[in-house]
Amino acid sequence: MSSVDGPTLAVVVDSSRLAAGIVDQNGEVLIRDRVGTPNRDVWRSLEQLVRRVMAAKPGEIPMPTVVGVSSIGPLDLQAGSVTPETMAAWSNFPLRQHLESLTSLPVVLDSAAGAAAEAERWIGEAVGLSSYLTLMLDQTIESACIINGVRLRGAHGNGGSLAHFAVESGGWPCGCGATGCLNMYASIAAIETEINRPLRRATDSIVERTGIMVGRAIASAAAVFDVTTVFISGGVVDTFGDPMLESMRREIGIRSRLESLSGLRVLEPSGLIQPLVAAAAVARLAGPDTPTDTAG
C-alpha cells in the first residue's frame, strides 16, 4: 500500500453519472456530490462537480493530497486518457491532465473494475487473497485481474478485460470489429438494444443465454489467468439474479474440468463498496509502476 497521507479526492466517471467526493484513510466518505452524465460538455459538468466538492470541504477536514479516478473504459493509462464506449463525447479525452490542472494534485487513473478490485483488497472481501478477478456487468462490461498481489495492467491499462472475449462463434458483430464478444451478450446496453425494451423485461431465454455467455468467459479467463476466485457484480446480475447465475455456473462446470480449476469460486460481494471508495482505493493502493501526473 502506498503511503498516502490525508484524505483522497475521489472521482467516478460512468455511463449514467459523474461523482466526486472526499474519502478518508479508512474508506469513509466525508463529502460527496454527483450529477447525471450529460451527452455533451461532460468535462464542464465534472469540473463544476469537483469544484463544488472542494468548496464544501469544512475547515476541520485536511486538504486531499491525491486524486483517485475510476472511469469506464477503454483507457490509455500512459497517456492518461479515456474513451468510454457509451460516451460519444469523449474520445481519447486527457482526463488525468485535466484533473491535474484543475486540482494541482497528483492524479491516479484506473478502470471501474480496476478500482473495484483495489477496493476489495483494501477493505473488502479480497483482503488476504493474492489472486482474483473482478467482473462488472453494467452498461458496459468492466473487468480486472490481480495475480500474486500484482495488478495486471497491460500496455494501456486494460489488462484483464473480458469485454471482448469471443464467447459465440459467428455471433453478433461488435464495435471492436470482431463477432461474438461477451460485450454483445452481457452488457446492459447490448441486451436492451437487442430486445428493444428495459433489461427487467428480458425473456427467460435471454437470461439463460446471458448466464451461458458469462460462464464461458469466466471459464476461459480462469484458465488463462490461473485464478480460482471471481467477484461478479453489476446491474445485469442484480436484475437477472439467480436464474442467470445458475445458468452461468452450469456452463462453468462444463468448461472448467482442468484440475487447477477444481476450486473455482464465483462470488457476489456481500458488502457494497461505494464507487467513490473504490476510486479512492485506486490512489491509496497505487504501485510504483502506476502512471500518475505529478503537480508541478
Image: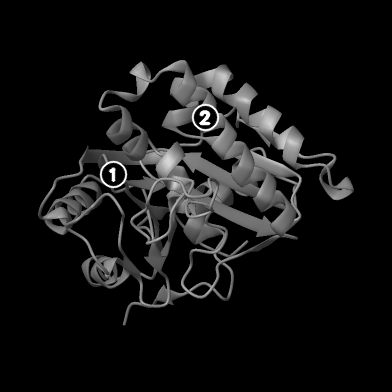
Q: Secondary structure at mark 1?
A: loop
Q: Please provide percent x and percent y for residue 103.
A: 26, 65
| Mark 1 or mark 2, earlier in chain | 1
- Crowdedness of circle 1 by 10 Å Cα count: few (<14), some, many (20+)? some
Find residue 174 and name its label: none
Q: Considering the image in quadrants, where does the N terminus appear?
A: bottom right
Q: Please provide percent x and percent y for residue 25.
A: 52, 49
Label 1 amino acid? Answer: Ser
- Residue designated by label 1: 15
Q: How many marks?
A: 2
Residue 24, visible in the rendered structure: no
- Residue designated by label 2: 209
Check the image and report above or below for 141 versus 158: above
Q: Secondary structure at mark 2?
A: helix
Specify the farthest residue to the right.
259
Q: Are marks 1 and 2 in contact (CB under 8 Å)?
A: no
**In terms of depth relative to the viewer, which is nearer, 290 or 244?**
244
Q: Considering the image in quadrants, where does the C terminus appear?
A: bottom left
Please tell me which residue is depicted at 44% across the width and 39% down the height of the picture: 185
Q: Nearer the viewer, mark 1 or mark 2?
A: 2
Specify the farthest residue to the bottom.
296
Label 2 amino acid? Answer: Arg
* Quarter of the rendering containing residue 123: top right
- Crowdedness of circle 2 by 10 Å Cα count: few (<14), some, many (20+)? some
Please tell me which residue is depicted at 75% across the width and 48% down the height of the picture: 129
Residue 90, visible in the rendered structure: yes
Q: Is residue 20 left or right of residue 240?
A: left
Please tell me which residue is depicted at 50% across the width and 32% down the height of the picture: 210
**In terms of depth relative to the viewer, which is nearer, 144 or 130?**
144
